[in-house]
Amino acid sequence: MTRPRFRRRIGWLPRLDYFVPASQSSDGVEEVILTLDELEAIRLADFEGLYQEEASQRMNISRQTFGRIIDSAHRKIADAIVNGKAIRIEGGPVEFDEKALENAIGDYCVCPNCGFIKKHERGVPCRFEICPKCGTHLTRKISLNNNKMKGGE
């Protein structure tokens, strides 16, 4: 029996969660799903230039797990670029580093069970939204107003 996955700590959320090749419309294009923890690994290692040891500490995972996550992310991104696929960013076993997210922009609804995330729709409370992956009610994890973190809805 495998042991349960630890939630990977992320300190950043993307402003956009879908990328499609310019020569194609988003209708009917094949997609690659990049999870939030894979995106965080890309951000820390490739964008910020951190060594895997430091990046793994920030994500609260082992260096070996970080290596597997970044390898998976690189393969997915390469597949999307080489084969002209869209990239959708969503979900993954994550927890939010609230201190690091203080400068995040936007509101999000998050599944507390599987980590699915979607942009919050104004006027629709997150608690009324159902996760399309596992059927759990979503929660409002991030609501920023004047750069101050607020709790759930």
Image (tube, helix red, strand yellow):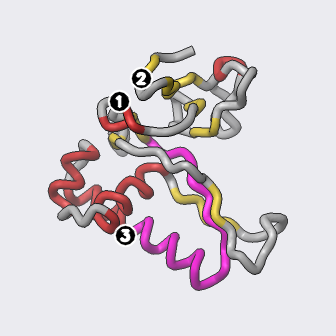
Which span of residues is magenta-colored? 72-93
Q: Which residue is mark 2?
A: 149
Amino acid tagged 1: Glu
Tell which tag, 2 or 1, sits nearer the viewer: 2
Q: Which residue is mark 3?
A: 71
- For the residues marked 2 and 3, what is the alpha-carbon distance in whole angstroms? 32 Å
Residue at horizontal 61 percent and vertical 64 percent from the top: 87
Q: Residue furthest right?
A: 27
Q: Residues within 10 Å of mark 3 (few under 14, many from 20)?
A: some
- For the residues marked 2 and 1, what is the alpha-carbon distance in whole angstroms? 8 Å
Q: Which residue is mark 1?
A: 98
Amino acid tagged 2: Met
Which quadrant: the N terminus?
A: top left
Q: Is residue 74 magenta?
A: yes
- For the residues marked 3 and 1, what is the alpha-carbon distance in whole angstroms? 26 Å
- The disc, 3 or 1, on the residue closer to the chain's N-terminal end is 3
Residue at horizontal 41 percent and vertical 23 percent from the top: 148
Tell which tag, 2 or 3, sits nearer the viewer: 2
Left or right relative to 94: residue 22: right
Residue at horizontal 37 percent and vertical 69 percent from the top: 71
Whole-percent x and y of residue 27?
83, 65
Residue at horizontal 28 percent and vertical 61 percent from the top: 48
- The disc, 2 or 3, on the residue closer to the chain's N-terminal end is 3
Q: Is residue 66 magenta?
A: no
**Secondary structure beneath disc 1?**
loop
From the viewer's side, name the closer residue of 26 and 102.
102
The image quarter in which residue 42 lies: bottom left
Instruction: Please say if the residues under marks 3 and 1 sit with CB atoms less than 8 Å apart.
Output: no
**Secondary structure beneath disc 2?**
strand
Instruction: Please say if the residues under marks 2 and 3 sit with CB atoms less than 8 Å apart.
Output: no
